[in-house]
Amino acid sequence: MATAAVTPISCRETLSTSYSSSVSQKQTNKSHQCRSQFSKSAALQSRHRGRSCLSRARAVVARAEGSAGRNRAVSPTRAVASAGEAETSTRPTDSQQAAGSSTWDQMEAAYTNYATGYRSASLDAELSQWVEAGDIQGEIPKELVGTLLRNGPALFERTGEDGKEKRRVYLDGDGMVFSLALKDGKAYFRNKFVRTPSFVRETEAGTFTDLSIFTAEDPRAGPDTGPTPLFRLRDDIFNGPPSPKANGAYNVVNWAGSLCAIDWGQPHGLSNSLDYEGKREGDEFSNAEFTAHYRILKEADGSRRMVTFEPKVDWAKGITTCTFKEFDEEGHCQQTREHIFPATYFHDMIVTENFYVLFDCPVKMDMFKTFIGYPFGKCSLGETISEDLNKRGVFRIFPRRDGVGREAVIQADEVPAFAFHHINGYDMLNAVGENKKNQIVFETCTWDRMCLYFNDIIKADGKTHWPRTKLSRFVIDLDTQSCERTIVSEKACEYPIVAPSATGVPHHYSYLVSNNRHFDDPKRGRINGPMQILEKLTYEYEADGTTIKELKRDPWNPGEAKFAMEPLFVPKPNSSAEDDGWLVVPVYNSETTLTEVAILDAANWEDPLLANVKLPTYIPHGVHGSFSEEYICGPDKTN
């Protein structure tokens, strides 16, 4: 058990490609108010850069298109690389390690094992069967009734008729949903690919045919063997944006009887047998558009609301349109709010009792990649944005309810911070006594530099990429329009959750995935091992209800060659304590190359493992999931 008194840490840290983790004293950002519109000078500079890149692009494309038969031989000479990929990948020696760290051989073995969980699944991997009693170690609590639902990219390799293997970036893979229906101490397993129109089309063709977001190679049919640079520049950039494939791979949820796989737009309706249904008539929930991240909050009358959001960014016009929707437990949309603001990037959201809160990462449209790199196939659509170290992250705050507060844009910190997955957030407007304040607490996992689309997690190798997140807490003061950041812990963290009862209100526990080992390199600093263990974080607060007095990080290690994935919290029946529930955790076993599901007692962390369920097939590491209180996806009547 790791116990530490928490003191605020200065955010004035030296940024470097090695992600220095030096620590200094507390500092507060006072009266940093962000402008909601770009300044005239910044706009002029941006316009000048855009015209410069456009001129270069036109010149290069003209030369390329003017040379018959040679258009694909012309390519930019400038390297197009993601942030953080310029680091040296020299293999350290064990003599370089500091006391308490792992040897490099141990680190390398861990990363090798971890990488085997990012293998593409095969098309014949779909199963539907009871989990045999011999594959359940321990006992599944009989009170645990419901269905674990999990989704993630699973098919990202296809072999064409020519026998050549085609590969897509992991996040572009076709989604595979797996379910584990639990009742009476038994488990029924299903897994099935999300058969989107793109999946069907590419399966029939035997190869990739559709443009994707994260892969630079463009397989769309063109005049010769694919789209020319001129086509990609004209149609995708100037007349775009293009419509990349929807892979149905980033989450799965069952809300109001509507089971849906989710990516970045229109949800994909599924039957209780995981068969693809697509858009369903009369189903408000599956007909809405939203991303893989949502929040479920309890209202004052005891009912629950699912809050979704759908950001649409138009970099050409320089605007983001973000739509928040709230669905009741019958699946009806009770509220829709739309907001328009300058183009930016954010991945997740926080919802409190009174506010929607977005964390804008300091990014920009990369002119070179947009007008030259992308048209020539040197970078993907996703790589046309890059970090902007001249900007700062900002919080965009929107009222959920009429008459409560106003919209605000508040600078996050003097040092750039990037965040993808947030832990929780709450406002203090309705707190009791002296704790009643016009403040919002926002807790998240932050990077000091932009980790483009989780490369530090999904491409982790200990040489170029490794987990470098920190646990950060921001206290946002709506009166002074200021923000104070505390780095709660320097230890790597990702895929965080809180109990459903704590969503949007002060939480005393959180659960997340972390690394089990590290290597201290004298040149590059601390190199963390892959995400592997699960941790329970216990918070003790000062009297103000927002400042953390003490934080305990208690680990649960699934095994030397096993890797925990995102946990899900399931409250016990009639529970009252915040941590009185079960954690259902998918675990990849690199020794068997199969997937397991661990069931833990969240309140008894000294000996939490109640059952370990061995699944009958391999499921890649995956992304996100949910737990349905309904027993769905169980056996057919014939079973």
Image (spheres, rainbow, N blue to C red):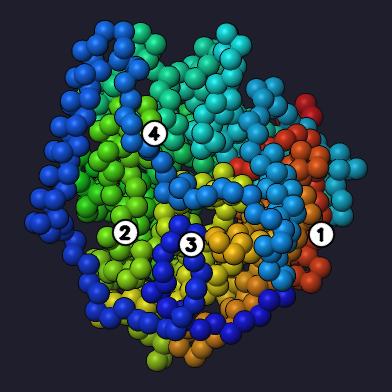
Tally the numbered discs.
4
Q: Which of the labelled discs sits on residue 380, or is there none?
A: 4
Secondary element under disc 3, as helix, strand or loop, is loop
User: Marks 3/4: CA distance?
Assistant: 25 Å
Kindly identify which residue carries mark 1: 610
Q: Earlier in the sequence, mark 2 or mark 3?
A: 3
Identify which residue is drawn at 44% across, 35% down.
214
In the image shown, does 87 or 466 lie closer to the viewer? Answer: 87
**Left or right: 599, with 256 as reference point:** right
Locate residue 602: give its quadrant: bottom right
Q: Amino acid at mark 4?
A: Ser
Kindly identify which residue carries mark 3: 19
Q: Earlier in the sequence, mark 1 or mark 2?
A: 2
**Residue 136 location, x and y as percent?**
85, 47
Kindly identify which residue carries mark 2: 389
Classed neighbour count for the residue bearing mark 4: other residues with Cα under 10 Å, few (<14), some (14–19), many (≥20): many
Q: Earlier in the sequence, mark 2 or mark 4?
A: 4
In front: mark 2 or mark 4?
A: 2
Q: Earlier in the sequence, mark 4 or mark 1?
A: 4
